[in-house]
């Protein structure tokens, strides 16, 4: 009969911990809107959103007034979001996903923690891009 020593048990528990940590989910929440500077036009916001999505390797799927839908794919996981915007802010809304352990029960949804990592990186890029939008008063007609 094989004997299991303490070292083997620790190694097995450590592996199990890594597996469980990789599969953890969090409640799905919509993060606070990103503010849009007052001097940025709606067209500039849409352009900024598309640039940020591209910078983060999202595919732009659809653009309608006030919305840009994008999809991010990494390995066997994908995430579809709707980036809604108006004169005062930008909000990133969950649409669909594959491989992110999305589940909804009793009126609350849960999703893999990678969702928040990807959304936070996109928000960071959006903030950076918004700071680089040229002031409309700097543009001249020729």
Image (cartoon, helix red, strand yellow):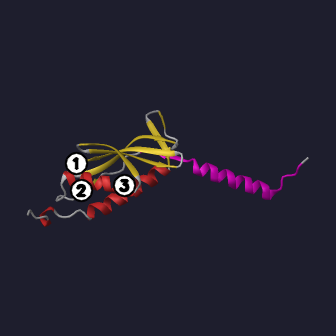
Mark 3 is surrounded, within 10 Å at the Cα level, by few (under 14), some (14 to 19) or many (20 or more) other residues, namely some
Mark 3 vs 1, N-terminal side: 3
Q: Which residue is mark 3?
A: 54
Seen at 20% across and 64% down, the residue is 134
How far apart in space, not on screen, are marks 3 and 2 (Cα)?
19 Å
- The quadrant in which residue 36 appears is bottom left
Mark 1 vs 2, N-terminal side: 2
Q: Which residue is mark 1?
A: 86
The x, y position of residue 19, in whole percent, is: 63, 50
Mark 2 is surrounded, within 10 Å at the Cα level, by few (under 14), some (14 to 19) or many (20 or more) other residues, namely some
Mark 3 vs 2, N-terminal side: 2
Q: Main secondary structure of the magenta part?
A: helix
Q: Which residue is mark 2?
A: 36
Camera-near label (3 vs 2) is 3
In this rendering, position of residue 30 left or right of residue 24: left
- Please report contact status of discs 1 and 2: CB closer than 8 Å, yes or no: yes
| Residue 27 visible in the picture | no
How far apart in space, not on screen, are marks 3 and 1 (Cα)?
20 Å
Which residue of the protein is positioned furthest toward the top in this rendering? 106
| Residue 25 visible in the picture | yes
How far apart in space, not on screen, are marks 1 and 2 (Cα)?
8 Å
Which residue of the protein is positioned furthest toward the right in this rendering? 1
Which residues make up the magenta segment? 2-28
Q: Quadrant of the C terminus?
A: bottom left
Seen at 35% across and 60% down, the residue is 125
The x, y position of residue 16, in whole percent, is: 67, 50
Seen at 52% across and 42% down, the residue is 99
The local secondary structure at tag 3 comes to: helix
In this rendering, position of residue 94 left or right of residue 8: left
């Amino acid at each position: 009969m094989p004997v299991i020593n303490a070292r083997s048990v620790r190694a097995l528990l450590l592996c199990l911990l890594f597996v469980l940590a990789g599969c953890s989910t969090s409640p799905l929440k919509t993060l606070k809107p990103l503010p849009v500077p007052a001097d940025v036009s709606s067209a500039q916001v849409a352009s900024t959103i598309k640039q940020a999505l591209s910078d983060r390797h999202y595919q732009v799927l659809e653009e309608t007034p006030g919305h840009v839908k994008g999809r991010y794919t990494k390995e066997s996981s994908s995430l579809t979001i709707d980036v809604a915007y108006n004169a005062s802010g930008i909000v990133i809304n969950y649409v669909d996903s594959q491989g992110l352990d999305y589940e909804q029960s009793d009126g609350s949804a849960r999703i893999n923690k990678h969702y928040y990592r990807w959304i936070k990186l996109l928000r960071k890029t959006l903030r950076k891009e918004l700071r680089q939008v040229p002031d409309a008063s700097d543009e001249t007609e020729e």
